[in-house]
Image (spheres, grey):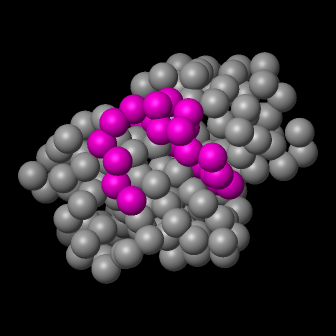
Amino acid sequence: MTTSELRGGPTQPEVCAVALEKLGISPGDYAIDIGCGTGSVSIAIAKTAEHVFAIDLRPEAINVARETIESAGCRNITLIEGDAIQFLSEKQKIDVAFIGGTKGLSEILLALAEKRVRSIVVNAVLLETAALAIAEMRSLGIFSEAIHIQVSRSYDLLGKTMFKPINPIYIIVGGCSRC
Protein backbone atom coordinates (compact mmCIF):
# COMPACT_ATOMS: atom_id res chain seq x y z
CA MET A 1 0.00 0.00 0.00
CA THR A 2 1.31 3.46 -0.85
CA THR A 3 0.68 6.65 1.07
CA SER A 4 -1.65 7.82 -1.70
CA GLU A 5 -3.90 4.81 -1.01
CA LEU A 6 -4.07 5.53 2.73
CA ARG A 7 -7.13 7.58 3.58
CA GLY A 8 -6.35 10.81 5.41
CA GLY A 9 -2.68 11.29 4.71
CA PRO A 10 -0.03 12.42 4.50
CA THR A 11 -0.20 15.75 6.32
CA GLN A 12 0.97 18.45 3.94
CA PRO A 13 4.42 19.86 4.87
CA GLU A 14 3.11 23.44 5.20
CA VAL A 15 0.37 22.30 7.58
CA CYS A 16 2.84 20.13 9.49
CA ALA A 17 5.16 23.12 9.96
CA VAL A 18 2.41 25.21 11.57
CA ALA A 19 1.23 22.31 13.74
CA LEU A 20 4.81 21.65 14.94
CA GLU A 21 5.33 25.31 15.76
CA LYS A 22 2.14 25.31 17.84
CA LEU A 23 3.13 22.03 19.50
CA GLY A 24 6.34 23.62 20.79
CA ILE A 25 8.42 20.46 21.09
CA SER A 26 11.54 20.65 23.26
CA PRO A 27 14.52 18.29 23.41
CA GLY A 28 13.78 15.61 25.99
CA ASP A 29 10.01 15.65 25.36
CA TYR A 30 7.96 12.50 25.14
CA ALA A 31 5.40 12.90 22.38
CA ILE A 32 2.38 11.03 21.14
CA ASP A 33 1.02 11.10 17.59
CA ILE A 34 -2.56 9.82 17.74
CA GLY A 35 -3.87 8.67 14.37
CA CYS A 36 -0.33 8.63 12.97
CA GLY A 37 -1.42 7.63 9.46
CA THR A 38 1.62 7.68 7.18
CA GLY A 39 4.02 8.55 10.00
CA SER A 40 5.13 11.84 8.44
CA VAL A 41 4.18 13.93 11.48
CA SER A 42 5.82 11.39 13.82
CA ILE A 43 9.06 11.75 11.88
CA ALA A 44 8.90 15.54 12.07
CA ILE A 45 8.26 15.41 15.84
CA ALA A 46 11.08 12.87 16.31
CA LYS A 47 13.64 15.37 15.00
CA THR A 48 13.35 17.24 18.32
CA ALA A 49 11.58 15.00 20.84
CA GLU A 50 13.31 12.37 22.93
CA HIS A 51 10.75 9.76 21.90
CA VAL A 52 7.52 9.55 19.89
CA PHE A 53 4.72 7.04 20.36
CA ALA A 54 2.90 6.77 17.02
CA ILE A 55 -0.53 5.19 17.40
CA ASP A 56 -3.15 4.19 14.86
CA LEU A 57 -6.09 1.79 14.95
CA ARG A 58 -5.69 0.82 11.30
CA PRO A 59 -3.26 -2.00 10.45
CA GLU A 60 -2.79 -0.53 6.96
CA ALA A 61 -1.72 2.81 8.48
CA ILE A 62 0.78 1.09 10.78
CA ASN A 63 2.25 -0.75 7.76
CA VAL A 64 2.64 2.49 5.78
CA ALA A 65 4.03 4.34 8.81
CA ARG A 66 6.53 1.54 9.47
CA GLU A 67 7.86 1.80 5.90
CA THR A 68 8.01 5.61 6.07
CA ILE A 69 9.76 5.63 9.45
CA GLU A 70 12.27 2.95 8.42
CA SER A 71 13.03 4.84 5.20
CA ALA A 72 13.67 7.99 7.23
CA GLY A 73 16.00 6.08 9.57
CA CYS A 74 14.17 7.20 12.73
CA ARG A 75 15.04 5.14 15.79
CA ASN A 76 13.15 7.10 18.44
CA ILE A 77 9.62 6.24 17.31
CA THR A 78 7.56 3.37 18.73
CA LEU A 79 4.67 2.27 16.51
CA ILE A 80 1.55 1.05 18.28
CA GLU A 81 -1.40 -0.51 16.54
CA GLY A 82 -4.33 0.03 18.83
CA ASP A 83 -6.42 2.35 20.90
CA ALA A 84 -4.94 5.62 22.16
CA ILE A 85 -7.14 5.63 25.27
CA GLN A 86 -5.74 2.28 26.35
CA PHE A 87 -2.18 3.47 25.75
CA LEU A 88 -2.75 6.73 27.64
CA SER A 89 -4.09 4.83 30.64
CA GLU A 90 -0.80 2.89 30.83
CA LYS A 91 1.84 5.47 29.81
CA GLN A 92 2.95 7.85 32.54
CA LYS A 93 4.84 10.66 30.81
CA ILE A 94 3.58 12.56 27.76
CA ASP A 95 4.72 16.15 27.22
CA VAL A 96 3.16 16.95 23.85
CA ALA A 97 0.35 15.38 21.84
CA PHE A 98 -0.54 15.65 18.17
CA ILE A 99 -3.97 14.33 17.22
CA GLY A 100 -4.58 13.61 13.55
CA GLY A 101 -7.12 10.84 14.06
CA THR A 102 -10.37 11.78 15.72
CA LYS A 103 -12.00 8.54 16.84
CA GLY A 104 -12.76 8.95 20.53
CA LEU A 105 -11.59 12.58 20.48
CA SER A 106 -13.53 13.62 23.60
CA GLU A 107 -12.08 10.76 25.67
CA ILE A 108 -8.59 11.36 24.30
CA LEU A 109 -8.69 15.07 25.20
CA LEU A 110 -9.93 14.22 28.69
CA ALA A 111 -7.11 11.70 29.18
CA LEU A 112 -4.52 14.23 27.96
CA ALA A 113 -5.91 16.91 30.28
CA GLU A 114 -5.82 14.48 33.22
CA LYS A 115 -2.18 13.73 32.40
CA ARG A 116 -1.56 17.49 32.28
CA VAL A 117 0.01 17.28 28.83
CA ARG A 118 1.78 20.60 28.22
CA SER A 119 0.82 21.05 24.57
CA ILE A 120 -1.95 19.51 22.46
CA VAL A 121 -2.57 20.09 18.76
CA VAL A 122 -5.57 18.67 16.91
CA ASN A 123 -5.59 18.76 13.10
CA ALA A 124 -9.11 18.54 11.71
CA VAL A 125 -10.40 18.53 8.16
CA LEU A 126 -14.06 18.55 9.20
CA LEU A 127 -15.72 21.62 10.67
CA GLU A 128 -17.65 19.37 13.06
CA THR A 129 -14.40 17.86 14.37
CA ALA A 130 -12.92 21.32 14.87
CA ALA A 131 -16.04 22.46 16.73
CA LEU A 132 -15.95 19.35 18.93
CA ALA A 133 -12.24 19.82 19.73
CA ILE A 134 -12.78 23.49 20.63
CA ALA A 135 -15.83 22.73 22.79
CA GLU A 136 -14.12 19.85 24.62
CA MET A 137 -10.91 21.80 25.17
CA ARG A 138 -12.88 24.79 26.47
CA SER A 139 -14.82 22.59 28.89
CA LEU A 140 -11.53 21.12 30.16
CA GLY A 141 -9.93 24.55 30.49
CA ILE A 142 -7.14 23.73 28.03
CA PHE A 143 -8.17 25.64 24.87
CA SER A 144 -5.73 28.24 23.50
CA GLU A 145 -6.64 28.98 19.90
CA ALA A 146 -7.99 27.68 16.60
CA ILE A 147 -6.34 28.34 13.25
CA HIS A 148 -7.73 27.83 9.75
CA ILE A 149 -5.14 27.14 7.06
CA GLN A 150 -5.56 27.04 3.31
CA VAL A 151 -2.53 26.03 1.25
CA SER A 152 -2.37 26.24 -2.53
CA ARG A 153 0.38 24.89 -4.77
CA SER A 154 1.44 26.28 -8.10
CA TYR A 155 1.33 24.32 -11.31
CA ASP A 156 1.98 25.09 -14.95
CA LEU A 157 -0.99 25.95 -17.17
CA LEU A 158 -0.03 26.73 -20.76
CA GLY A 159 3.28 28.27 -19.71
CA LYS A 160 1.64 30.35 -17.00
CA THR A 161 1.41 29.77 -13.26
CA MET A 162 -1.87 28.75 -11.67
CA PHE A 163 -2.60 27.70 -8.10
CA LYS A 164 -4.51 24.62 -7.08
CA PRO A 165 -5.87 24.64 -3.50
CA ILE A 166 -5.30 21.78 -1.10
CA ASN A 167 -8.11 20.98 1.33
CA PRO A 168 -8.29 23.53 4.14
CA ILE A 169 -7.50 22.38 7.66
CA TYR A 170 -8.28 23.53 11.17
CA ILE A 171 -5.55 23.43 13.81
CA ILE A 172 -6.88 23.52 17.36
CA VAL A 173 -4.29 24.29 20.02
CA GLY A 174 -4.37 23.80 23.76
CA GLY A 175 -2.66 22.15 26.64
CA CYS A 176 -1.90 22.33 30.32
CA SER A 177 0.98 24.81 30.20
CA ARG A 178 -1.23 27.28 32.06
CA CYS A 179 -3.61 24.96 33.94
Residue 102 lies, with reference to residue 68, above or below; the image says above
Residue 90 counted in the magenta span: yes
Query: Which residue is at the front of the view, 1 or 168?
Result: 1
Image-quadrant location for residue 13: bottom left
Could you say where residue 22 lies in the image, as x and y percent from the top left? 69, 56
Residue 155 lies, with reference to residue 125, above or below; the image says below
Residue at the farthest left position: 1
Left or right position of 105 against 24: left
The answer to whether residue 135 is seen in the rendering is yes
The answer to whether residue 100 is seen in the rendering is no
Residue at the farthest right position: 178
Residue 89 counted in the magenta span: yes
Could you say where residue 109 lies in the image, as x and y percent from the top left? 63, 30
Could you say where residue 54 lies in the image, as x and y percent from the top left? 41, 52
Query: Which residue is at the front of the view, 28 or 37?
Result: 28
Residue interval drawn in magenta: 78-101
